[in-house]
Each structure stands twice: as C-alpha cells, then as structure tokens.
Image (spheres, grey):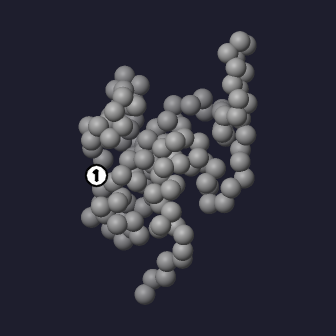
Amino acid sequence: MIVSFDPMKFRETFPDAFPVAVYSDAYLQSCFNRACVQISNAEGSVIPFDQREPILYLATAHVAILGKRDATLTGQITSAGQGSENVSVAVAQAPFNKAWWFLTAYGQECWMACKPYTSFVWVSP
C-alpha cells in the first residue's frame, strides 16, 4: 500500500502552521510529491505503512516551508537583523544530507523518525 495525501488531514496534523492563504492544497500536494522523492512511498518501501504517513507528512511540511523561503537563500540561518535587513547563512557539512533535513524543525523530526530505517544496510534476498 502507498500513502495518499489528504490536505485536510495534513492541516489537522499541523494546526495553524499551514494556512490556506499561504499554502494552497495544490502547493501542499506538490510538496508531498517532492517528499516522496526523498522518502519512498512505494509498495516495497523499508518504512512500514503505519509509520510512513507521519514521516511523509513531516517531510512534506519541511519541503513546504523551504519552498516558501527566498530561493536565493540556501543553508541554515545563523543570524538575522532587522535594521537594513541582514541575514547570515551557513551550509553545514553533514553526511547523508542531514544538513538539509536540519533546516526546519519538521525536517529534524523527520530525520529522527527515519533513523531506524537508515541506520543499516538493507540486503535484498
């Protein structure tokens, strides 16, 4: 089985975090589709079906937030100002794209939730 995206359920999972005025259902669906590129939603996924929806929803939230950032701003925000609007960013060096996942709290939670499925090598019979 695969997980289908339900925008209403997604919004209930993260109340007040993704208002319709900013994050349309179509945008969230596209973010879910992109999240499925990062985390398998296929029949043979190593992530059990009952665990997959919450993990994919965390990944979707992560992608949605990053997608609304300034496209020229990459990396973790290390400092910000208000007068004269200055922002400093740093791209951390981390294995397995950990730095990318740690750009949002949702990404961090997703990274931790995936840990049991990425901590070892899978061997097909």
Look at 36% across and 42% down and name the residue there: 29
Look at 71% across and 29% down and name the residue there: 79
Let me know if residue 33 appears in the view.
no
Element assignment for label 1: loop
- Residue 85 at what x, y percent from top left? 69, 17
Report the front residue among 55 and 73: 55
Residue lying farthest top? 83
Look at 43% across and 87% down and name the residue there: 125
Report the front residue among 45 and 80: 80
Q: Is residue 82 above or below residue 121?
A: above
Whether residue 74 sits left or right of residue 10 in the image: it is: right
**What is the quadrant of residue 88 in the picture?**
top right
- Residue 87 at what x, y percent from top left? 70, 26
**What is the quadrant of residue 98 in the picture?**
bottom right
**What is the quadrant of residue 104 in the picture?**
top right
Whether residue 89 sits left or right of residue 59 in the image: it is: right
Look at 40% across and 42% down and name the residue there: 30
- Residue 14 at what x, y percent from top left? 36, 37
Let me know if residue 124 appears in the view.
yes
- Label 1 sits on residue: 4
Quadrant containing the N terminus in the rendered view: bottom left
**Mark 1: which amino acid?**
Ser
Pointer 1 local density, CA inside 10 Å: few below 14, some 14–19, many at least 20? few
Whether residue 113 sits left or right of residue 86 in the image: it is: left
- Residue 83 at what x, y percent from top left? 71, 12
